Amino acid sequence: MASKANSIKRIVAYFSMEIALENDMPSYSGGLGVLAGDTIRAAADLRLPMVAVSLLYRRGYFTQRLAEDGTQTEEPVEWAVEKFLEEEPERTSVTLEDRRVELRSWRYAVKGVRGFEVPVYFLDADLDSNAAVDRNLTGTLYGGDSYYRLCQEVLLGIGGVRMLRALGYNELTRYHMNEGHAALLALQLLREEAEKAGRTSIRGEDIEKVRSKCVFTTHTPVPAGHDRFPMEFLTRAFPNQKEFLDLKDTSSADLMKRVLQAGQNFPDLQEAARGGASLNMTQLALGLSTYVNGVAKQHGETSRQMFPEVPIEAITNGVHAGTWTSPAFQQLFDRYIPNWREDNYSLRGALGLPAEEVWASHLIAKHELFEEVRKKTGLNFDPEVFTVGFARRATGYKRADLILADLNRLRQIAKNAGLFQIIYAGKAHPNDGGGKDIIRHIFQAKKALRKTVPVVFLDDYNLDLGGKITSGVDLWLNTPQFPLEASGTSGMKSALNGVPSLSILDGWWVEGHIEGVTGWSIGESRRAAGGGAPTDNAAEAESLYSKLEDVILPMYYNERSKFLGVMQHAIAINGSFFNTQRMVQQYITDAYLR
Ligand SMILES: *Cc1c(COP(=O)(O)O)cnc(C)c1O
C-alpha cells in the first residue's frame, strides 16, 4: 500500500478539526469544514504540494429530524469508513492522563483538475489497543464536554504532527492552523526543535523557528467563540507535565511562560500562564504564528480590535467553483468559457453569455431544487414564482427569522409587488437552544402564512442540499447581525450560479456588494458609522421589506432583462473572485511563501 499520495514532497500541512469532502462522509458540521474541503480542492487544482490532517468521526455530525412543530432531534450517522478511506499501516501515539493513545490514519486523495492529488489524513483512535474512553475520542464532532474537546485537540495538533512524521512527511515548511483547534501542533513542533538540538527544554530560538513555520487563520469574531480550557484540564490531561512536551523539566504552565517570554507580549496569555486561569487556543496560535489572517476584510478589522497585540491581515474566503456550480451552469460555462475550472478569473466573461441561455440554465437548477422540495415535503412549488433561499447553521446571530418579523407586511408585499416563496434549511447545534427556537419559529410562521407566502423548511442540510438550494433559488438572503458574520460563503455559491444576494453589509458582502449590480444590501454600511451602534432589528427588517417590495420583485416580474443583468454580474464580478482558487493563491503569496 503506497503511503504517500505521490512521491512529491509536501511543503504545506493544513490542519482542520473538520473537512467536508463528500456528502456521505459526515466529517463536517458547517462553514468551517466546507471551507477546508474547498481549500484542499483548490490546492489540488493549483498543484500546491499540500497535505491535510483532520480527525475521523465514526458517529459523524448528526442527522437532523424535525417534528411537525419544527422541534429538532439528532441521530448519530453510521457510515462505512472503509468505503471512502484507505487505512495506512503507520501508527503513532500521544499520552493522555498517563495512558498511551495509539493512532492510525485513513487517507482520502483529493484530485485536482489537472490530476494532481492532495492527501487528507483522518486520525483514528478507535483501536483495540486503546482504552474505551480513548477509543471514543474520535467519535463525534463538537460532541462531549470541554475536556473531551481538549483531548481531541491534543490528538489533532500533537498527534497530527507525529502522524505526518510517521508517514514520512519531513520536508514541510508551513503548518496552517484552520482555526485555533489545531494550535497544539505548535507545541509538538517546539518539542521537535528542542530534540533536534539535543536539549530537554525550550529556548527562545526554538520558538522563533516554530513561529516562522506557522500560519493561523482565525474565523471567530466574538471573544466567547474562541476555545478556552482551564489550566486544570491541562494538568489532568498531562499529570506528570511530561507529555505536554515530553521534556522532563517543562511543566505546561512553565512552557507557556517561556513561549510568552520569548515571544511578543500577550497580557492575556501571561495571565493564563500564571495558573488558575485558562489556556486560550487563539492566543496560543497568535503567539506562535508568523502570519495571521481573518477571513474577510471586515473580519480582519474586527479581529485586530479583539487582538490589538498582533498584526492580523485578511484573506477573504472563497468557494470551490467546480464544486458549487450546478450541472446546468457547468455545461453553459464549458461551452462559452473554456478553462473556467483551471482559471476561475475567466468567469468575468459571464457578461458575454447569451441571456436566454443563462435563464434556461437557471430554470434547470430551479426545477432540480423544486424536485428536491417535492421529495422531501410532498409540496409542489411553482417555478414561475420568485423564490428566496436561506440555508445555514440555525443560530441566534444569523437571524434566519428576520424576514418573518412582520407576517402582515409579507402578505401585503406578495399582494402588491408579486408572489414569492421561501426555502429554508439548516441544523442547530444540539446544545444551541436559541437556534432550535428559531427553527420552531419558522415552522409557526410557515403555518400562519400558508398559501399566501409558501414557506418550506428542508431537513438535514448537507453539501448536496446546499448545492441545490444555493443554485436553485432566485435570491440568496443573508441576515447576520453585524459584525458577527466572519465571512459567510453560501452567497458566493449562489453568485457562481447567477443568483444575486440580498444581505446585511457584513462578512464577504462588504466586498462583493455593488447595489443593483451584483445584488442588494439590507440597511446601510456600518463601517463608516464605526459599526458600534446596537443592531436595530426592526429597521433592518424594514429595509429588507422595502428592497423586496420596491426594487427586487418589480425587477424580477416586470424587467426580466434587467434582472438577468444582475444575475450575470453576480457571476462575472463575484463568481470570478470569491472562489478558493484566488483565495489559495493569496495564501501562497502572503502566507506560505513569505
Ligand atoms: C456552504 C455551506 C455552509 C456554510 O455556509 P455559510 O453561508 O458560510 O454559513 C454550511 N453548511 C453547508 C452544508 C454548506 O454547503
Image: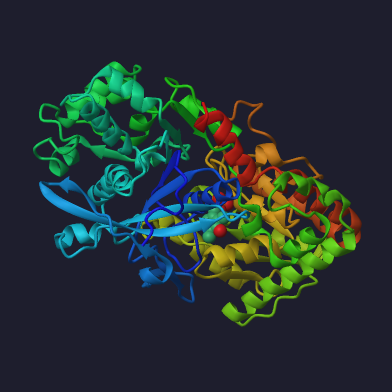
Q: Residue at x 13, y 42 (%)?
A: 236
Q: Position of residue 223 (x, y in %)?
A: 40, 35
Q: Residue at x 40, y 31 (%)?
A: 214
- Which quadrant does ligand 1 occupy? bottom right
Q: In this view of the protein, which residue sits in the foreground, 587 or 362?
A: 587
Q: Residue at x 34, y 40 (%)?
A: 227
Q: Residue at x 46, y 75 (%)?
A: 67
Q: Position of residue 182 (x, y in %)?
A: 35, 42
Up/down of 518 relative to 63, above or below: above
Q: Is residue 424 left or right of residue 107?
A: right
Q: In this view of the protein, which residue sits in the foreground, 79 or 303?
A: 79
- Which of the colour schemes (rainbow, by chain, secondary structure, one colour) is used? rainbow
> Farthest residue in the bottom direction?
378
Q: Position of residue 198 (x, y in %)?
A: 18, 25
Q: Which image quadrant for residue 455?
A: bottom right
Q: Is residue 73 left or right of residue 36?
A: left
- Residue 523 visible in the snapshot: no
Up/down of 386 relative to 219, above or below: below
Q: Which image quadrant for residue 371?
A: bottom right
Q: In this view of the protein, which residue sits in the foreground, 331 or 564?
A: 331
Count of labels shown? 0
In which quadrant of the rendered image does the N terminus lie?
A: bottom left
- Residue 549 visible in the snapshot: yes
Q: Is residue 81 left or right of residue 353?
A: left
Q: Position of residue 494 (x, y in %)?
A: 68, 55
